[in-house]
Image (cartoon, rainbow, N blue to C red):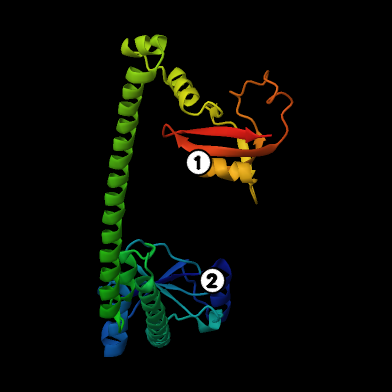
Amino acid sequence: MKVRFGLTEQLRQDVFVQTGQQLPSQTTIDVPTTEFTPDERRFLLRFQGHAAEEVTLKIPGTLYVSNIQASVLFANNDQIWESSSLPLASDDIHQLLTGYSAAYVERVQDNDRFRQEALKQYIQKLEAQLADPEPIRGYPQSALKYYKDCEGYDRAEALFLQLEARYKAQEEEKEQQAREKSRQEKERKEQIERDKTEWIGQYASASLRKKFEAGYNCQRDYAFERAHAEHPEYLLDYNDDASYKDRSCPSDAAFAEAERVGGEVVYLTKLPSTAPEWQDEYYDFDECEAVVIHEYLGKYDLIRAFF
């Protein structure tokens, strides 16, 4: 196996002064792997994933040797290399790799302990989500791969699959509810249109009936004619621009009217733009009590002011 590392110009000069050796900027040392112990060779395989012919050492104070075919071993960052202690011989490399092996095993063990503790927290989060009536999707299955070889992985995977089943069932239920809501809304609108056609045919003015039968929608004229016929004392908020707020305690008259028409007593702060402001009761309007009939004809407010 060939071990390579790079030398800074300062290190090359120091080595020359100390030993007389003139080293190239990229130094390669042949190290017989037969001299390694089984544990050291096992470490190299675990680190590299294969029996590499070259290993590049990243030694603090030296240059990083860029070699796309080489594996990189990271030395202890606290170690300061001087010219007198550079690993320039096979025995030096052997000793260096022994230290690398021990440090690597320790890092692996620390990482394993960290992942084990993280898996416990992951399981606790999954259990908390399962206990929630409406769990929030937020734990991708890809996160499980990180704990594949940890104790408790099977438990985490089972909990995750239970959560996925819950998510799927909830999504299907929401989709069903949305379809049902859409169906009901469609039926509601169709009923409103049938009711409109029936009312215009029986009660509308001749002018409105003739235009409607000719294919015109006539929604505005229809809404005003019908509101005036059924609730002559009320204003139709056709443009939805009236304003009102809660009424803490209604008067007897307003309360009785609300009970009669199935409306709500409110405090009117702004008249609808359709109000005939030229009439005395609406001219120079002041805020007052009012009764509102909501959802008239499926979409409007009818408002009666109590001055």
Which residue is drawn at the image coordinates 50% and 29% (left, top)? 231
In which quarter of the view is residue 210 placed? top left
Question: Please, what secondary structure does the residue beneath circle 2 have?
Answer: helix
For the image shown, how many numbered marks are present on the structure?
A: 2
Q: Amino acid at mark 2?
A: Arg
Q: Position of residue 140 (x, y in %)?
A: 34, 63
Which residue is drawn at the image coordinates 28% and 41% (left, top)? 183
Which image quarter is the C terminus in? top right
Which residue, given by chain and number where applicable, does mark 2 sit on?
12
Q: Earlier in the sequence, mark 1 or mark 2?
A: 2
Which residue is drawn at the image coordinates 56% and 67% (left, top)? 9
Q: Position of residue 11 (x, y in %)?
A: 55, 73
Q: Amino acid at mark 1?
A: Arg
Which residue, given by chain and number where applicable, does mark 1 sit on?
260
Measured along the vertical axis of the image, is residue 87 above or below residue 307? below
Residue situated in front as seen by the camera: 207 or 35? 207
Q: Position of residue 40 (x, y in %)?
A: 32, 86
Spatial separation of the CA atoms under disc 1 and disc 2: 103 Å
Which image quarter is the N terminus in? bottom left
Which residue is drawn at the image coordinates 53% and 32% (left, top)? 302
Other-residue count near label 2 (Cα within 10 Å), few / some / many at <14 / 14–19 / ≥20: some
Question: Is residue 280 rendered to the left or right of residue 195?
Answer: right
Question: Please, what secondary structure does the residue beneath circle 1 have?
Answer: helix
Residue situated in front as seen by the camera: 69 or 249? 249
Question: In this orientation, does residue 186 appear?
Answer: yes
Q: Position of residue 238 (x, y in %)?
A: 52, 26
